[in-house]
Image (spheres, rainbow, N blue to C red):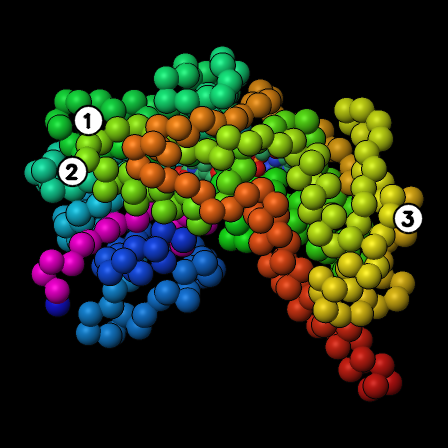
Amino acid sequence: MNTNQKVALITGITGQDGAYLAELLLSKGYKVHGIKRRSSLFNTDRIDHLYEDPHASDPQLVLHFGDMTDSMNLTRIIQETQPDEIYNLAAMSHVKVSFDTPEYTANADGIGTLRILEAIRFLGLERKTKIYQASTSELFGLVQAVPQKEDTPFYPRSPYAVAKMYAYWITVNYREAYNIFASNGILFNHESPLRGETFVTRKITRAAAKIALGLQDKLYLGNLDSKRDWGHAKDYVRMMWMILQAEQAEDWVIATGVTTTVREFVRMSFDYVGFELRFEGEGVEEVGILDDIDQGKYANVTGNVVPSGLLSSIGEVVVCVDPRYFRPTEVDLLIGDATKAFRKLGWTPQYELNDLVNDMMEADVALFLRDLYLKEGGHKVLTQAE
Ligand code: NDP
Ligand code: GDR
């Protein structure tokens, strides 16, 4: 066992960011501990490729059952693992769902952060353990100024954002009160092929791939006008690590500085599979209609011949607005100014929006091509048996 080896603890390791961060830290030679929730189905898909046999003599990735709502559990895991760095990524992270589960969201996202900080104090680890808190651009909520940066006033617009605001300030308070190295990363939206299926970008890329392959007819979305500053999760987890290597604990905005509407993201995703979309109507009447289909481009993308009769035809409505996806209070516009991180930490994102869309579309087309083969193969087996 290497006694100089750095030890990290990641809460939320089974999520999008947790998976990329675990991969990054392992590649840097860290021993990584992660907290996963008990679930009735396996929930480690995103990190299975990193997982080692727990019976190995010194596995570099170790998972512990836990929950942000259980103080004793968190304190015991921190005591046992004695981490040099804690990345607190665990959260009920879906803004719309937080309106349905506000109390739970406050408990897990808000008080959960306090539990981690108190455990550090209780265990006397103030001088040893650095903490990264996953703060969010949702704190800016109702637009006060653009672009949003570290000193832009907060105005949260959801139970999720309010819970994260508590987490933000309790992190600042413990830094000031107890001199703990605790930093907030105020991260703007970041996406990837590992993004949860109910966040808007992944919902769109999955649907564009499935519609193109004839596996789905329509995509139902909420507010197409909202604007987000979308980056790639791979770039953003690198930044989390850099934030804990900085000379001092501070709070950092991480963003690309480019904002795009949901509608434009839809257009770009369908364009990848050679579908040109025209949007018509307003509000809940708005629909996205297939204007053109570039069969040649589509065939190149998949490397496969699309089964005849499965493709949508020109003039067909493939995107519809469904008010069930509207939020009681919306965040209309996010665009971040990450000048401080660029200057002081030397961070530069490697992915632009177009690269992000391509990466997500490529992964979802490959994913659903497998479904298509099964559908087709199953059909053949059945017809042969007849
Ligand atoms: P995900 O939703 O993909 O992952 C959340 C993780 O938290 C999952 O591992 C989940 O476990 C775990 N979790 C949820 N509730 C609990 C709980 N009560 N106890 C223990 N674990 C729990 O989120 P992301 O990876 O996208 O985001 C990571 C963090 O960064 C979150 O805190 C999010 O709020 C924040 N953030 C994300 C941004 C983004 O654009 N992605 C932007 C700014 C901030 P399970 O797999 O079992 O559900
Ligand atoms: P967000 O991400 O709320 O910004 O939070 P999400 O992808 O859920 O929504 C982005 C925007 O798209 C609009 N939208 C829809 N959203 C979803 N989920 N489903 C739809 O059908 C749909 N149609 C339109 C939304 O109204 C919104 O304006 C994410 C999460 O990762 C948070 O945890 C994180 O803190 C912030 O990003 C930064």
Instruction: Identify which residue, 128 or 278, lies in the foreground.
Output: 278
- Residue 124 in percent (x, y) is at 8, 38
> Relative to 292, does residue 184 appear above or below in the rendering?
above
Mark toward the viewer: 3 or 2: 3
Query: Given contact means CB atoms under 8 Å apart, are the residues at marks 3 and 2 in contact?
Result: no
Category of crowding for the residue at label 2, using alpha-carbon neighbours closer than 10 angstroms: few (below 14), some (14–19), many (at least 20): many
- Residue 173 in percent (x, y) is at 22, 22
Q: Which residue is mark 2?
A: 120
What element does badge 2 sit on? helix
Q: What's the amino acid at mark 3? A: Ile
- Say which residue appears at 66% left-offset and 34% top-offset: 262
The span picked out in magenta is 2-19
Instruction: Identify which residue, 105 or 129, lies in the foreground.
Output: 129
What element does badge 3 sit on? loop
Category of crowding for the residue at label 1, using alpha-carbon neighbours closer than 10 angstroms: few (below 14), some (14–19), many (at least 20): some
> Relative to 379, does residue 217 appear above or below in the rendering?
above
Q: Which quarter of the image is occupied by the N terminus?
A: bottom left
Q: Quadrant of residue 240?
A: top left
Category of crowding for the residue at label 3, using alpha-carbon neighbours closer than 10 angstroms: few (below 14), some (14–19), many (at least 20): some
Quadrant in which ligand 1 is drawn: top left
Q: CA distance from mark 1 to mark 2?
A: 10 Å
Q: CA distance from mark 3 to mark 2?
A: 60 Å
Q: CA distance from mark 1 to mark 3?
A: 59 Å
* Disc ID at residue 174: 1
Q: Which residue is mark 3?
A: 314
